[in-house]
Amino acid sequence: MYALCALGLVISSVLGLLVPWMTRDAINAVSAAREGSASGPGRLLRAVELLALFAVLHALFRYFSRRSLLVAAREVEREMRRQLFSHVIRLPMPFFHATPTGDVMSRMTNDLGAVWLLLGPGLLTLAGTSITWVLAIAFMLRISPMLTGMSLLVAPLVVLLSREYGRAFHRQHRKVQESLASMNATLQENVSGIRLVKAFTLEEREEERFAVDCREYYRRNLDVARTSAAFHGAIGFLAGVGVAFVLYVGGRSVVSGTLSLGGFVAFNAYLAMLAFPTMAMGWVINLFQRGNAAMGRINEFLRLPVESSESGGRAAREAGVPAPACAAGRAVPRGEGAPPYLLEVRGLSFSHEGGGRGETLRDVRFTVRKGEVLGLVGTTGGGKSTLFSLLLGFYPTPPGTILWDGRDAAEIPLPVLRRRVALVPQDPFLFSDSVLENICFGRETPDPAAARDAATLARFLDEVEELPRGFSTVVGERGISLSGGQKQRATIARAVCAGSDFLLLDDALSAVDAETEREIFEGILSAKGERTVLFSTHRMASLSRCDRILVLDAGRIVEEGTHDELLSARGTYYDLYSRQMLARELEDSS
Amino acid sequence: MNSPPDAFFLEDRAETKGVDWKLLRRLLRYVVPHRGILAGALAALACGTACQLAGPYIIKIIIDRHITPGVLPGMGRWILLYLAALAGAMGFLYLQMYAVSVLGQRVILSIRREMFSRMERLPVSCFDRTPTGRLMTRLTSDVEALQELISSGLVSTIGDAAVLAGTAAILLGMHLRLALVVFSVLPVLLLFVELLKKHIREANREARRKLARLNAFLQEHVTGVSVVKAFVQEGKSERRFDRLSEEYTAENVRLTNFYSLYFPGVEMFASVAVALLLWRGGVALIAGAVTFGTLVAFLEYAQKFYNPIKDMSDKYNILQSALASSERIFLVLDAEVSPEYPEPPPGGQRMRVERAAARKPASAAIEFRDVWFSYPRAEGGSADRPAEGSPVLRGVSFALEEGRTGAIVGATGAGKTTVLSLLCRFYEIRRGQILLFGTDIREIPRRELRGMLSLVLQDPFLFSGTVLENVTAGGPAVGPALAAAGVDRFAAEWDAGLSTPVGERGGMLSMGQRQMVSFARALAREPKVLLLDEATSSVDPVTEARIREALPGILSGRTALVVAHRLSTVLSADRIFVMHRGKVRESGTHAELMAEAGIYRRLHSLQFGEPPRG
């Protein structure tokens, strides 16, 4: 493909360079005619005809070579984008906590763009310029070697100047970007802190601060403008000096008869043709430097190890380290012939890397049997969401601490592990897509019937049908926005629709009223014994239908039992429960 | 002319319409103050173009007077003249480019500042409803697009236009019939450009749209990556991403196709013009009707003439998107400001307040009389009349005497914070009256009103800058404020002391330190009334201790209204207002309210006390 492009480029360059050559022939024919040659007018016509023909052919070849090369570069870009995306979404969760979204976005947009500029226009210009250079000089040498040598004396200067300009431009442009960032930071601060600005009548002060930023930005921009203007002036002058040179020396040669008038004119045309590619070289060098740097940043991401889908979730991290013998996949016997627990957590301690912020878990242990409904309560920051994340294998856990059907989670491939459960996260995140697509997110292809069933169960169906386009209504950024309660029910429908019979609900009904919550629970539990549910909630009333309740406080399970057992224990659960009852009483007392 | 404040977050309009002259005229109004620079730029442009166009003519003279007749003496002079013209052209080019940049940057500077001032005066409700991202886009990307028009588009467009006009004039002047030969391909060329221009513009817009969708998808899947992982849908997301990427690539390929056709095409037409020129000119030359020099000069001028046409399509694109941006910019500039701006004329009003305060010394510092309020709703309702949500306050009435501390307590959503916002006049109330020292706050000029109040928000938001700058932003009484809030004590431990930068949003300080700095900022104002919204979320023990230590000193002897979440704060208040479902249901001292056995007592045991046992 690239070879064909190169061939096309060569042919088109040759054709392009033949145009001034024909001009030479035409003028020489005129000269001959003026001196009385009878063949003059005929030669003129033939030269002109050839010129037009070459011009048309040149355009044709140029079109094809340009097109094929740029399209090829676009294809490469697309392939890279695909690779990068599939790599990034497979990176482990800690990566997303450590990397700002803006950084990921910038590598996938700006950096990828820089790489495309290198592969497309950059390569095209480099190839085109090189070919034009070599061929133009060949033609020029044929006309006059002496003139060629002299006129090209300025060429290195032009390249050098362009490169210097490219560097200066890049440097100054970075400063422009820096002051733009500072200006935008002030802006952002004022948007977020508008209440304080108004409360303290800081409008004028902030205006002044913003004006300082603006003026800095203004100056930086003018620096760029000055450099750019100076460069254009200087380069134009240098090119003109070359022309003046050719005029003088070439003129003398014409007079002395060593150069034809046509050759003289054609030579000037070739020189003009070289001016742009020479300038472009500076630009191309810059493009390559930037593209290279961008490629480096992209590779930084591509080199990060992804979550393994083959072996256990921890394989990537602990490659080569044998798992401690304690758990390594054996079923842990629990009495004679009893099947292993569906889920067993034993001695799970965890804190986020970097420590300090976030929830930690300390020696958490509990078991879940198939068909059980387990409630999880506790104070904010007690570790509920962290526990859910760990069950899904979002973070590496010590081997042998989480067992599914007696098998160490570390041994289970992550996709298999995650398909065992369906999570309803605390933050009801929906994609900007149709309701149908959102509810069927966990399926390979959307299934309207399944979506209806799931929406019915989540008490969401009536509202979906009232939406302008029903299940096809687009929600989110590009569509209509749903209320918090609607979003939560959509995420419940999504989890139900995913087909797993183990539901994890992370405080998933906080924005839904108590009556609807009860109905949803009825729905989820109607096929009791088939679905296993682990849910955390702040609403204690929903816990009464649990088989067992776990009370999580400061990362530990402090109590465990049925609602009645825990109430009579008069511990943490009792405290939480009586507070909430009081609050409800208060609510009702209006 | 004023548009409703919501209008500027309407979706982007399609950029299909042509050049809107009304918009252009409005943009031009920003140029008027800099007409001196504009005149200079135009003068430089005229001189530069003249010098530039003199070049080929000098070549013609050199050929006709020296090269063709073979007369060498004197040729050097013309060469020097050529160089001088060239130097002039480039010198003027520099001046012109720089002057246009200065002009453009100044215009942008004033638009940017105007926009910022306008933004600062928009009602707070605008900020509640508009996603920060979209507002930022208006204030940044749109202005950038306009700047792009000016810095790259305008500068070269003006230059190109001058060269086109100048070349045409010279060609016509030198030899009418040959000039017509040069122009002969023009109609076909313009038709070609026009045909492609439409496609290029459309493909460009489509490509940008596809890119926006691609990026939105990307952003969404990065933020929602945990959902993708939880449902093991990496494969599906990847396929959908690649489909969007494919659409974007396809649009780009289409665009590449047009561009690949465009540039070689224009060049081909130019070459055909040269061929025609050589042919007709050659024939005329043989007949002796023109000189060699004329023909050569014509060849040069023809090049200069066809070059600018190459970029025409790009320039038009830039102009289009810049106009679309400026339309959105003007929407912000036309947005209606909050009713407390602009200031009523100073003087009269101010006196009234003082008089009022003097006349009624015994009246309450703060009084709410049957205040009804609901937040404007984000969705629903037409743009000019936002639908009202359900009322947050339903007839709130209470009064607080001067020098006393009042604590507002109540369950979440009872409307406590709203009371503080309304007192600051961030929103307009629907019904009733809010009085400050006996005067309706709507009659107090903004500066006066907010000068009397000092607000401490739940989230201790600090501006980037130093600790001292943040406190100074509050008011003049910096020293006592620093001491009262205990900022001086912990600042003394830092190397830079009070000049320590707080970082973006105060991120370099601990939560407790931020809280203290925001107290100091509020006190530096020497406010008549301190408004304090205590943080609901539990803070770390160190912060808790700090606040508990500092608060009594801050509150004692001051008129203060506190949304209280801390038992110690409630107990130290002179008066407690119990809010429930948008009304003040009980008020009194702690002892009184506890005796009443009403909402307060239950609330108290819920929030602060041990839960009742048994």
Image (spheres, coloured by chain):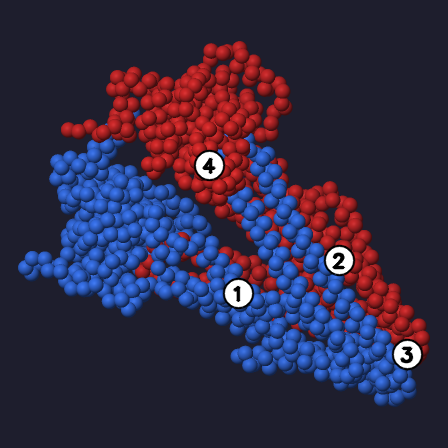
Picture disc at residue B68: 3
Q: Secondary structure at mark 4?
A: helix
Q: The C terminus of chain B appears in which quarter of the rendering?
A: top left
According to the rendering, which colour does chain A have?
blue
4 or 3: tag closer to the N-terminus: 3
Q: Is residue A417 above or below residue A149?
A: above
Residue marked by disc 2? B94
Measuring from the top left, give residue B595's x and y in whole percent: 26, 17
| Callout 1–callout 2 Cβ contact below 8 Å | no
Q: The N terminus of chain B appears in which quarter of the rendering?
A: top right
- Kindly identify the amino acid type of the residue bearing the numbered disc 1: Ala
Which one is closest to the eye, mark 4 or mark 3? 4
Which one is closest to the eye, mark 1 or mark 2? 1
- Kindly identify the amino acid type of the residue bearing the numbered disc 3: Thr
Measuring from the top left, give residue B425's x and y in whole percent: 50, 27
Residue found 24% across the figure and 42% down from its top: A553
Disc 2: host chain: B
- How many residues crowd mark 2 within 10 Å: few (<14), some (14–19), many (20+)? many
User: Taking the image as drawn, is residue B121 in sight?
Assistant: no
Q: Secondary structure at mark 3?
A: loop
Disc 1: host chain: A
Picture disc at residue B491: 4
- Kindly identify the amino acid type of the residue bearing the numbered disc 2: Tyr
* C-alpha span from label 1 to label 4: 42 Å
Residue marked by disc 1? A293
